Amino acid sequence: MKTTLIGFGLTSVFLASTLCAQQGLPSGYQPYTPPVVGGLPPNSRGLEQPVFVADRLGELPEQAMQGPNRYDQSKGSPAGPVPPQPTIPTLNQMNQFAPGDLIATVGEERILVGDLVPPDKVTKELASSAQFELMLRQALVDRVTRMALAQRFVNDKVAGKPIKERDSARQQIVKQTNKIFFEKVVPMQKEKMKCTSDADFDTKLAEMGKSLTSLKEEFAESTWAQEHLRESVPEKPQIELSEMNDYYQDNIDQFRRPAKVRFQILTASFSRYADKQAAYQAIVDMGNQVRLGGARFDGVAKRSSTGLRASEGGQMDWTTQGALKSKVIDQAIFENPVGGLSQILEDADGYHIVEVLERTNADIQSFAEAQNEIRKTLIKQKTAKMRSDFIKKVRSETQVYTKWPSDIPNSLGLDQLLNN
């Protein structure tokens, strides 16, 4: 699994090499009689993030972006216990927030309201809204997670060095990260934002509640968090044959393959003729050209058909039973023999003749056929679980004080810190 750095699109391999060494007939037409065939961004300083950061946030593992204990409904399985969810406070319960208010500490780093919301955007109206505290709490959970991962990354890099060398080692990590930021990230963002000068870039950042410094800090924190995950969690965990077989047996419906048909169709639409009799005569003529005259079906469709894909010879893509709007046509294509013309069919839109080109019966994909896809699925699931567990471990081992300790497992109330 190739990972890219959060928010900025640089490959983690590049950073690692740098930082870590790094679907009654008229006479004449003679159809076959058909038998029935069976079958928020890193180091966020605001709830309103600039597009150039927000549109690149897909690379941080979902658990880190949404909180490591969130339930993943798209996968139908939990990434871990569902944590308590913040309730929307009433106006009487609302706290009044100011940009400089301390709301959490992670290790030795502080998080202020202004670190999550641009200070100039924390208006009285916003701070008094019923949703503001909820949004702030959700953003804080994500920020605490990234900050804890980033801190662990740096600490692990300097661990084992003599105390007097640790500050120098940290400074070197910061220096190398800044080099990547200014040489790679800033030019890319200037081009994306169509900035003509450094001053223009600064102005546009300010309009978003950002600055070059805050952008640099976001890049460093999100990069270090991503790198720590990449280094600590295997990209391709071992998947045993027994695990794949269990998944196949437990999810057998996932491997059922419905019957499907590819066919071609001639149509005389009621809307294109004076009356139903005229439309009926037209479909008879088309059928006779094919059945008695030996004309190519697709040629007749291009010349005379008034229905779907007439210009393409009336040829339809693979379709499964029940997928067509016309139930009459849907039934015919699954009952008529392959290569045989149907009887004249009537539905709400007109008269039709169909010919089945190919059909496959419903079956179940074998375990051998499904192995590769099952392995990919299990790798994805296992990696996500391992990342979730690792994130929870790092966060539990990082001292966190927060205004809302019930939102973050193993954290302490900010009042305990302030009272010490």
Image (cartoon, rainbow, N blue to C red):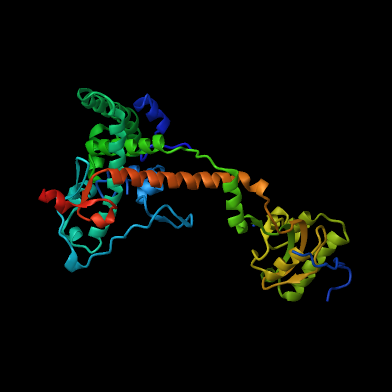
Q: Nearer the viewer, residue 405 or 98?
A: 405
User: Would residue 202 be found to the left or right of residue 286 on screen?
Assistant: left
Indicate the position of residue 295 as horizontal and vertical percent values. 84, 56
Indicate the position of residue 71 as horizontal and vertical percent values. 41, 56
User: Would residue 227 be found to the left or right of residue 103 on screen?
Assistant: right
Residue at 12 percent across and 49 percent down: it is: 418
- Up/down of 22 relative to 33, above or below: above
User: Would residue 375 be found to the left or right of residue 181 on screen?
Assistant: right
Indicate the position of residue 21 as horizontal and vertical percent values. 37, 24
Residue at 57 percent across and 52 percent down: it is: 247
Quarter assignment of residue 78: bottom left
Q: Nearer the viewer, residue 406 or 150?
A: 406
Quarter assignment of residue 303: bottom right
The answer to whether residue 344 shows anywhere in this view is yes
The answer to whether residue 100 shows anywhere in this view is no
Give the number of callouts. 0
- Up/down of 178 relative to 293, above or below: above
Residue at 83 percent across and 67 percent down: it is: 35
Q: Nearer the viewer, residue 374 or 49?
A: 374
User: Would residue 148 be found to the left or right of residue 23 on screen?
Assistant: left
- Up/down of 392 relative to 181, above or below: below
